[in-house]
Image (cartoon, rainbow, N blue to C red):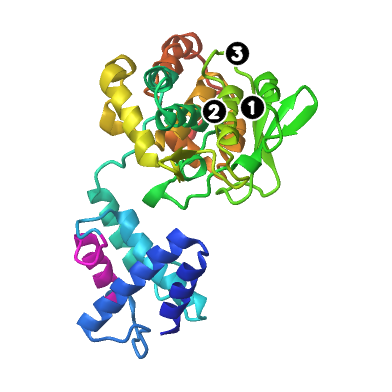
Amino acid sequence: MAVYRTCRRQVAAGVHRSRARSDLTAWRQWSRFCGWLGVPTDLAGITDPVPILQLFAERVRSGVLAAGGGRVTKGTVEGYLRAVAQIYASVGAQDPRLDAVGKLDFRLKRQFAAYRKEDPPSWRVRPIPLQLLHHVYEHLHGGDARHAAVADLAYIAFFFLLRPGEYCDGGSESDSTPFRLRDVTFYIGSRRFSALTATAQQIRDATYVSLFFTTQKNGIKGEAIGHGKSGHPTACPVQRIGARVRYLQSRGARPDAPLSSIYFQGKWRSIKSTEITSALRASATSIGDTVGLRPKEISARSLRAGGAMALLLGKVDTDTIKLVGRWRSDAMLVYLHVSARPIMQQHASTMVQHGAYALIPGPPTADQE
């Protein structure tokens, strides 16, 4: 069918690759389901497709048609149906989920609501405090090139609020479009130096560093995000990016080499997000109790949340945090935990100081006149 060929072309072309693959998986399961049920995949001749969609949703929910084979959440079920519907739309067919006025059919809406009530609380990535990154750096930076890169990249992700695929090989978590050597610019005052030509001394003297957006998610092509020196001897975005650039220069890396590249056994490879996660969890095993973290609660994705939390605790307004992290909605608020003690430390006294007030009375009712 045309929709199947469309998905295959998108995957082959690398267009929205992770999404195209997930759409293809959903369509394969839909085709399998329709074959089992004995109905055409395009639902031709089906007057009311919603009951069929409901049954498909239930089989995805139970895990029979889910990619992982286990029970899935409401969000995953919605994703499967959305993917099927969008593939229909891509060839000009009508979205079978919608009613006559173009809204989600009430039967599907009610089914999804029931799934939401049954689902366990959603897991939120825990932000990583700076103490943990200091511990990672202290234990890794004196090691080999791989360990030094992991320590540098953890700090870089924290300061720039990066997703795993933006600062290392994100693996299956995301499409990897990491920042490259050519994307880095250093500044000494108003003077700028490309990472491709900057000398080691210019890099050491730099007071500001920027990363240039190309294909990173939610980034505007042609714009850049930067940081000045932090004043800390190791936790400094200028120093840590400088360390990565000097390493790549010393090994003769090409301009398109990711900042996460290391030269190992005669060839280049990129640090993986799993290596970042392992380092973070190892430090959490050692000092996690002091910062309220358990190893299994964090991953490479937590560095983005950690940077956002640091900005929030520093009383940076949420609009600025959204700009730094390239969030296009209030989704970033999900990452910021009120369980962080500094956020809540003074709130009780504030509420006592400002909690006593008098309301302006409304107009009298009939029985008060």
Q: Hey, which quadrant is residue 143 in on the image?
A: top left
> Spatial distance from mark 2 to mark 3, Cα to Cα?
13 Å
Q: Hey, which quadrant is residue 83 in on the image?
A: bottom left
Position of the N terminus, as image quadrant, is bottom left
**Residue kind at label 1, given as amino acid type:** His
**Residue kind at label 2, given as amino acid type:** Phe
Q: Which residue is mark 1?
A: 227
Look at the numbered disc 1 and give the secondary structure of its residue: strand
Residue 178, numbered label: none
> Spatial distance from mark 3 to mark 1, Cα to Cα?
12 Å
Instruction: Classify 10 Å Cα crowding around label 1: few (below 14), some (14-19), many (20 and above).
Output: some
Look at the numbered disc 3 and give the secondary structure of its residue: loop
| Count of number-bearing discs | 3
> Spatial distance from mark 2 to mark 1, Cα to Cα?
8 Å
Q: Which residue is mark 2?
A: 159
Callouts 2 and 1 close, C-beta under 8 Å: yes
